[in-house]
Image: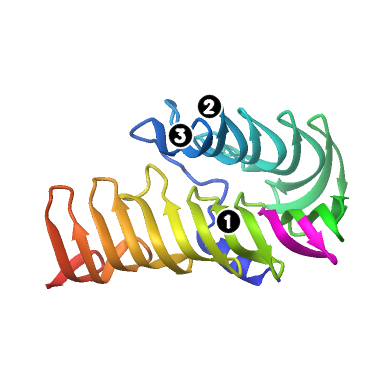
Amino acid sequence: MKTNYYVFIIIFSAYCSLNYGQNSSSGCIFGNCFNGFGQIVYDDGGVYTGYWENGNPKGLGMFFSTEVRMWGEFDGNKLVGFGGMCFLDNNETSVGEWVDGKRNGTFYVLDNKTNEWFGAVFQNNQFISRTSNMGCLNGDCSDGFGNFQWADGLRYNGEFKNGKRYNKGTFFWPDGTIYSGEIKNEQANGIGIYLFSNGLYFEGVVKDGLLSNGKMYYKPNENNVKYIEGDFQGPYMVKGIIVFKNGDVYNGDTKEGIFPNGNGTMNYSDGRSVTGIWENGQIIQRK
């Protein structure tokens, strides 16, 4: 039951070696960066997207900088539950349970020489041995709350019923993508959030692991779009609202989510409004 997830994640995923770039502004870009969910750009260019408590990262989140990528459960600037860390200079990547920012327990590790993943046991951040220990790592993976990991590194923390993923839970992919929300038929179905490994953030309705309707925020330094909101097919919005960083707002049919394409109206920040047929972001017939 993982097929839809993997087709979807391949489209949106970005490898550890991605260059996040420099941001032109700092501060809270969107959301609530004190108590809630939001994205902040730090003065050094680092970007954190996730949950906050009393002005500090707390809960699910993702951090990018020019040196490291981190994703998972945060407490301040440290990983404190399931999550991953990748150093960009050598592609060294570890995914597993963190205690006070240190590796403890079973991890999924990328060998930067062979580019292959393997299981490993760590204690207080020190490598102990390789392991093939997968499956139900702890909890109740039959009828209760459990922690299950597949051999390919996909991890699920959440509720189980009759040995199946059920009701609510969180999926973690080795590349850093996270889904947290409602589960039905063992897949993401219902209200949830996606934190994609390339920095995109989606909140809304998901069907069979794919985006259906909701809002997606873009990275501060990516293209000229702030966020989009509307109906999705697979990874892309096909109809809805595009809010541009310069204040322009488009409402109508779209292509790949970020290009006006089809019938729609563009309301420009200077007060002008253009309605008509669009193609790849350009008006071709006014109405």
| Residue linked to disc 2 | 55
| Residue linked to disc 1 | 192
> Measured from the top left, where is residue 80 in percent x and y?
71, 34
Q: Which-is-in-front pick, marks 1 and 3?
A: 1
Q: CA distance from mark 3 to mark 2?
A: 11 Å
Of the pair 48 and 164, the residue shown nearer to us: 164
> Measured from the top left, where is residue 126 in percent x and y?
81, 31
Q: Residue at x 30, y 49 (%)?
A: 224
Q: CA distance from mark 2 to mark 1?
A: 23 Å
| Residue linked to disc 3 | 40
Q: For mark 2, does the 10 Å Cα neighbourhood hold few (<14), some (14 to 19), or many (20 or more) residues? A: few
The answer to whether 94 is drawn above or below residue 1 in the figure is above
Answer left or right for 18 relative to 267. right
Q: Residue at x 72, y 54 (%)?
A: 116
The answer to whether 125 is drawn above or below residue 236 in the figure is above
- Looking at the image, is mark 3 or mark 2 earlier in the sequence? 3
Answer left or right for 157 relative to 178. right
Q: For mark 1, does the 10 Å Cα neighbourhood hold few (<14), some (14 to 19), or many (20 or more) residues? A: many
Quadrant (top left, top right, bottom left, bottom right) of the C terminus:
bottom left
Is residue 194 visible to the viewer in this orientation of the structure? yes
Q: Are marks 2 and 1 in contact (CB under 8 Å)?
A: no
Report if residue 170 lies within the magenta region: yes
Q: CA distance from mark 1 to mark 3?
A: 21 Å
Q: Secondary structure at mark 3?
A: strand
- Looking at the image, is mark 2 or mark 1 earlier in the sequence? 2
Q: How is the image coloured?
A: rainbow
Is most of the magenta stretch helix, strand or loop? strand
Residue kind at label 3, given as amino acid type: Ile
Q: Secondary structure at mark 1?
A: strand
Q: Which residues are magenta?
A: 159-173
Q: Quadrant of residue 256?
A: bottom left
Q: Residue at x 20, y 60 (%)?
A: 266
